[in-house]
Image (cartoon, helix red, strand yellow):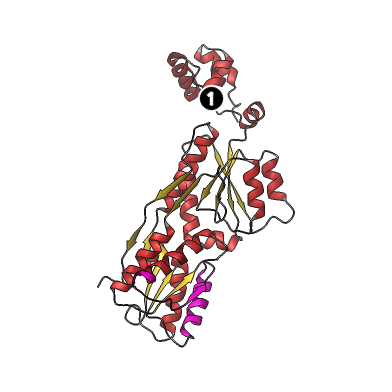
Amino acid sequence: MMPRPTIEEVAALAGVSRSTVSRVVNGSPAVSPEALAAVQRAIAELNYAPNRAARSLASRQTHAIGLVVPEDTTRFFGDPYLASVVAGISARLADSDYILNLLIASDDPGGKMVRFVRNGGVDGALIVSHHASDAFVDSIADAVPVVFGGRPTTVRESDIIIDVDNAAAARSAVAHLIALGRRHIATITGTMTMAVSVDRRDGFLAGLADAGLQSCGEIDGDFSEQGGADAAARLLAQPERPDAIFAASDLMARGAIGVLRSAGLRVPEDVAVIGFDDSALAAASDLTSVHQPMFRQGEMLAGMMIGVLAGRRQEPLTILPTELVVRGSAPAA
């Protein structure tokens, strides 16, 4: 194996001092254009890679960003929303000097995750899928800079948040169902300890109120396919069967559709269904769904954290657009 080139060799080839190479590697602007070009040519010629551990000790930075997901691994690996957000984060970090550390746990009973963060394991944290009961997430937010994907249940003045207008999106979905002539509309909510679930439920109720209608049922489906199936079965057991269901995620909508069809009901003729996310499974199952830019949200989460760590001011709240994508489960009139 060829010996790894050193910073001294880069400096010698570029005809500059070791400290100049160090400034270039660490992105310092205090380098002349000529020196910058010479160092970059030498780095390319020698295929030099900075020693991350040494840089971390010198700067007290890890050049790692944590993605904190307070969920169990089944939810994390099975949810298309989370998968798309992570893909966006990874794409943005690929163009940076940062790596991504996944911190996945529905709880932190021994404080292991918080200790890792507080002991300098990451420079900052991206927090996605936040629950009201996640006290360990609050401890992480007290230790390092954070950017939230989705509104936390309690917003602090220092928080930086990237989200969509979940209430308005749900309201537009209900308006579409009403325009189709549906009057007995139910919802399958996400976990109600999450702000996103509350907002989508509130938007659902507001959409009904716009038309002078009452809810035909609100059942928590915990953002899972099985939860959506169980919720649909409970809705069908009610005295009044819904003629439309707004599900707060595509996974729950797919679970509900399976139960509806097993009960001999036609979608959309007997029961129209709308999901939320517009994930790949929505297109594959001809599901009408609220589109939110999940990949873009991930890119922006990572980009904003890079900005925070560089000392640049970031907007405290960014709202990304949504739109209803109409397919066969609730086709246009």
Kindly identify the residue that appears in the image at 46 percent across and 46 percent down.
Answer: 317
| Quarter of image, res 18 | top right
Question: Residue 237 in the image: x percent, y percent?
Answer: 49, 86
Quadrant where the N terminus sits is: top right
Say whether residue 70 is magenta.
Answer: no
Left or right of 95, for residue 289: left
| Quarter of image, res 254 | bottom left
Q: Can you say whether 1 is above or below 140 in the image?
A: above
Question: Residue 56 in the image: x percent, y percent?
Answer: 64, 31
Q: Secondary structure at mark 1?
A: helix
Kindly identify the residue that appears in the image at 69 percent across and 41 percent down.
Answer: 118
Looking at the rendered structure, the kind of residue marked 1 is: Val
The mark total stands at 1
Question: Residue 43 in the image: x percent, y percent?
Answer: 50, 23
**Which is nearer the eye, 149 or 167?**
167
| Quarter of image, res 51 | top right
Left or right of 118, for residue 175: left
Q: Can you say whether 54 is above or below 226 in the image?
A: above
Kindly identify the residue that appears in the image at 46 percent across and 18 percent down.
Answer: 36
Residue projecting furthest to the right? 110
Quadrant where the C terminus sits is: bottom left
Q: Please give the residue where the numbered disc 1 appears in the rendered image.
A: 25
First to last magenta residue range:
209-237
Q: Can you say whether 75 is above or below 137 in the image?
A: below
The reply to whether residue 296 is visible in this rendering is: no
The reply to whether residue 12 is visible in this rendering is: yes
Say whether residue 210 is magenta.
Answer: yes
**Which is nearer the eye, 208 or 98?**
208
